[in-house]
Image (cartoon, rainbow, N blue to C red):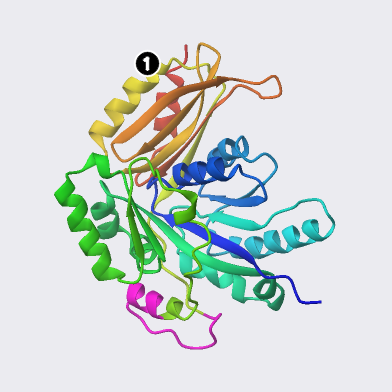
């Protein structure tokens, strides 16, 4: 009897706030979320996106915190071995895996997880690295972040998102720049990450031989030694805050605080998101990157949920006490 074909793994990457989760939501909705495991990695202590994704694919989301390409890489391998065990025992059925990395993860190190043990290499196959690019903010991100550079250099598919927020000529110039950096990647231009699942899944484009060369290009240094023994990669100098407040909060006050905050320091805030216990009893969702954010009422809190405002802020020069006080001032 022939061995089972390896399970395809799509690595979904892109810098903070580029639109990875929006794209993932669209893909899962299109395919129904069935027989697809999502491994969700978030930087910080709260699994905001994981909770929202779990509503689309109940029971199929696995969560990892921290930098997925460092200590968490061990947990990633453990997660995939656990998936194999659960599948063999009939506890879960899946035909593909999508790994959404934190916006601060270097995709090459994530891909190498699947070459660190014969069991993973036989059972899984990296299908493609899909990188979402924020057309409005990528110039700033590339200047400030070697990780953003690596994500583009290693991509098999580049999704140029938020094209509606810049001029058409700027989109064309960005595409030309991306082509110069990575001529092998397929490019798609999107608004709100509107892309068919067929453009993301089943690409069969990943080539492991590209990893060392792409990492040399990104870091400007050679890589000696065994293929799994690469030097530590460079981290971006960001920190994160976790803001927790029982609330409830007045959404107009919260909106006013955020408006003032992004006017004062738009480029200190790379990513901010979370759930808000709104005064009307609804569960609102905050999604923001740099100077752009949305604050949207969603469904009411369920009986099995504890209403709570839970926000994650990623950026530089963040003061916990200052942010805690500002959020408290938005209470009803």
Is 11 placed above or below 288 here? below
Q: Position of residue 324 (x, y in %)?
A: 45, 29
Q: Position of residue 133 (x, y in %)?
A: 34, 53
Q: Nearer the viewer, residue 237 or 105?
A: 105
Q: Image quadrant of residue 68? A: bottom right
Is 128 placed above or below 316 here? below
Q: Image quadrant of residue 80? A: bottom right
Q: Is residue 216 magenta?
A: yes
Q: Which residue is mark 1?
A: 252
Question: Which residue ends up furthest to the left in the rendered image?
Answer: 169
Left-right relation of 193 to 139 = right
Q: Could you say whether the residue bearing mark 1 is in a helix, strand or loop?
A: helix
Residue span colored magenta: 213-229
| Image quarter (top left, top right, bottom left or bottom right) of the N terminus | bottom right
Q: Nearer the viewer, residue 295 or 75?
A: 295
Q: Position of residue 218 (x, y in %)?
A: 34, 72
Q: Is residue 75 visible?
A: yes
């Amino acid at each position: 009897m022939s061995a089972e074909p390896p399970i395809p793994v799509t690595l979904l990457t892109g810098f903070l706030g580029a639109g990875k989760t929006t794209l993932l939501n669209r893909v899962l909705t299109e395919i129904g979320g069935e027989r697809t495991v999502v491994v969700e990695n978030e930087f910080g202590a709260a699994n905001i996106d994981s909770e929202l994704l779990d509503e689309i694919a109940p029971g199929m989301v696995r969560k990892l915190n921290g930098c997925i390409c460092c200590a968490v890489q061990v947990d990633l391998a453990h997660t995939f071995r656990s998936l194999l065990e659960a599948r063999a025992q009939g506890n879960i059925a899946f035909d593909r895996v999508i790994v959404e990395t934190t916006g601060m993860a270097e995709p090459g190190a994530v891909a190498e997880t699947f070459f660190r043990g014969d069991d993973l290499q036989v059972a899984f196959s990296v299908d493609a690295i899909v990188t979402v690019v924020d057309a409005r903010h990528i110039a700033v991100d590339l200047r400030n972040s070697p990780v953003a550079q690596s994500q583009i250099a290693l991509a098999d598919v580049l999704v140029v998102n938020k094209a509606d927020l810049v001029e058409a000529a700027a989109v064309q110039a960005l595409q030309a720049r991306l082509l110069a950096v990575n001529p092998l990647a397929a490019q798609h231009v999107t608004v709100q990450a509107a892309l068919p699942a067929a453009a993301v899944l089943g690409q069969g484009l990943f080539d492991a031989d590209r990893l060392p060369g792409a990492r040399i290009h990104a870091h400007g240094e050679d890589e000696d030694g065994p293929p799994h023994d690469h030097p530590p990669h460079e981290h971006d100098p960001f920190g994160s805050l976790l803001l927790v407040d029982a609330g409830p909060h007045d959404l107009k006050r919260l909106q006013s605080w955020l408006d003032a905050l992004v006017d004062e320091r738009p480029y200190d805030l790379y990513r901010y998101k979370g759930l808000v216990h709104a005064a009307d009893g609804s569960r609102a969702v905050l999604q923001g990157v740099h100077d752009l954010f949305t604050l949207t009422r969603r469904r009411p809190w369920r009986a099995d949920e504890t209403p709570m405002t839970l926000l994650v802020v990623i950026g530089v020069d963040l003061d916990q006490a200052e942010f805690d006080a500002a959020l408290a001032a938005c209470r009803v």
